[in-house]
Image (cartoon, rainbow, N blue to C red):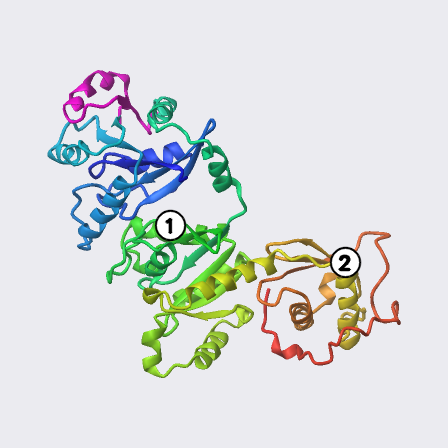
Amino acid sequence: MSVHTVAIVGRPNVGKSSLFNWMAGKQISIVDPTAGVTRDRVDYLMHIGDRYFEMVDTGGIGVVDSDDLSDQIEQQINLGIERADLLLFVVDAQMGITPLDREVAARIRHIDCPKLLIANKCDSPKLDQEVFEFLSLLNAPIITTSVISKRNRDELLKGILEHLPPADEDESSEGASRASEPELKLAIVGRRNVGKSTFINALSEEERVIVSEVAGTTRDSIDIRFSMDGKTFVAIDTPGVRKKKSLANDIEFYGLVRSQRSIRRADVVYLFFDATNTISRLEKQLADEITKQYKPCIFVVNKWDLGTDKEMTTEKWTEYLTKQFAQMRHAPIAFITAKDSRNIKQLVNLTQAIYKQARERVSTGQLNRLIRAAMKLNPPHYRQNKRPKIYYATQVGVQPPTIVLKCNNPELFDDTWKRYLLGIMREELPFKEVPIRVFFRSKDQHEGDALSLEDNPEVEDDLNLTHFDPSSEAAEE
């Protein structure tokens, strides 16, 4: 059984996205005075009382798109309407009936599902008495709302629950599962026109988002649920990033902010590259944001079927990426062709392995034995005539793996030795392909014994670290 769907429809600029965000209680859809901002379907799982339903924001019916994507927008609207169990027909109470309102009404009037007529922008109760003219458009219960004045949200949600089809016996359990299960969230980021939306459609096995040669087609960050091998995932399709000085309007600025926010809330980030193009400063800026957030990342080289024409082998691309992103040399690399769904399942399997690494824990005993062995192999140099000492280490968190090293003075450990120790940890602990946070902290009084060689002459020798080359680990904060 699927969770029931409530689709919001109407002409452009009647406040559909504002209403959607207001009901969801968070900023999800972009809200802008420009007509046609919403292009793809944007959805959100609502939980009201003991009912779950999926709310869908659709593009404005009848919009003339500036990038000539009107047909694709209409296709997304049609899919939203066809799958709806309840339609919310939104009109602008201040503007009155327009020809486009009549067009929308004619389009949905004969659809066999319940409908509610939402007279939006009733900022004052005085307008409530003037909305009944809209009943000539559609014979349906009418509810007045105002996002600005926060009027009648509860009445609207109550009306939705009353007109949704009856709940199946397993709706509560399925909705709760979808809302609360620890889903793996994938943020898909990259510059414009690298194939992110094509990839999303391949994952969901449907035309879930608009795909066009026009750069910047996607404007919202869209959460797409998909299943593979019995497991549920959420893929976050983000707007393509461009240079800040090149941002044409507020819509693109909001898209940039949403890309950054998507990175923060993701479990794993896919940084997309176009196999036919070189790496730009934009990818490096995104990589910096991913690094700053300590997010596991996979470099995804898309359009590989085209890239091979330029004689760029996987080995050359790997070398190229490693050189360009030295701070993320631990990140694995995947080569795919999204339009043919080539290597996509392998990529998702790799993602699950990366996610598992980020959630691993190691025992304090294992960690301290490793530190002892690392200090024996390459003791930190004296600084300020003082010997750096580490007293003990412990892992205090996951996602990312977070390790605290208690020491006599954090300032005594230089960056070169810290990089060496980080490399040892990545080599010997189950965190080979994910970021590791390491904190050096001064030891509180009476907090354990030192692990330095002089204090611990019987160092564990079962860890073979002699093969490790400290110079191989790139600088990492």
- Vertical relation: 157 (above or below) 476: above
Residue 228 pos. (x, y %)? 45, 55
- Vertical relation: 247 (above or below) 49: below
- Vertical relation: 238 (above or below) 299: above
Residue 221 placement, left or right of 390: left
Label 2 sits on a secondary structure element that is helix
| Image quadrant assignment for residue 104 | top left
Which residue bears the numbered disc 2?
Answer: 364
Q: Amino acid at mark 1?
A: Ser
Q: Which of 331 and 103 lies nearest the eye of the viewer? A: 103
Residue 268 placement, left or right of 391: left
1 or 2: tag closer to the N-terminus = 1
Which residue bears the numbered disc 1?
Answer: 221
| Image quadrant assignment for residue 83 | top left
Q: Residues within 10 Å of mark 1 (few under 14, many from 20)?
A: many
| Image quadrant assignment for residue 420 | bottom right
Q: Say whether residue 277 is visible.
A: no
Does 145 lie within the magenta span?
A: yes
Residue at 49% in and 40% down: 179
Label 1 sits on a secondary structure element that is loop
Q: Quadrant of the N terminus?
A: top left
The residues tagged by marks 1 and 2 sit, at their Cα atoms, a distance apart of 40 Å
Q: Are marks 1 and 2 in contact (CB under 8 Å)?
A: no
Residue 170 placement, left or right of 95: right
Please state the extent of the stretch shown in magenta in the rendering.
Answer: 120-149
Q: Say whether residue 373 is visible.
A: yes
Residue 345 pos. (x, y %)? 44, 63
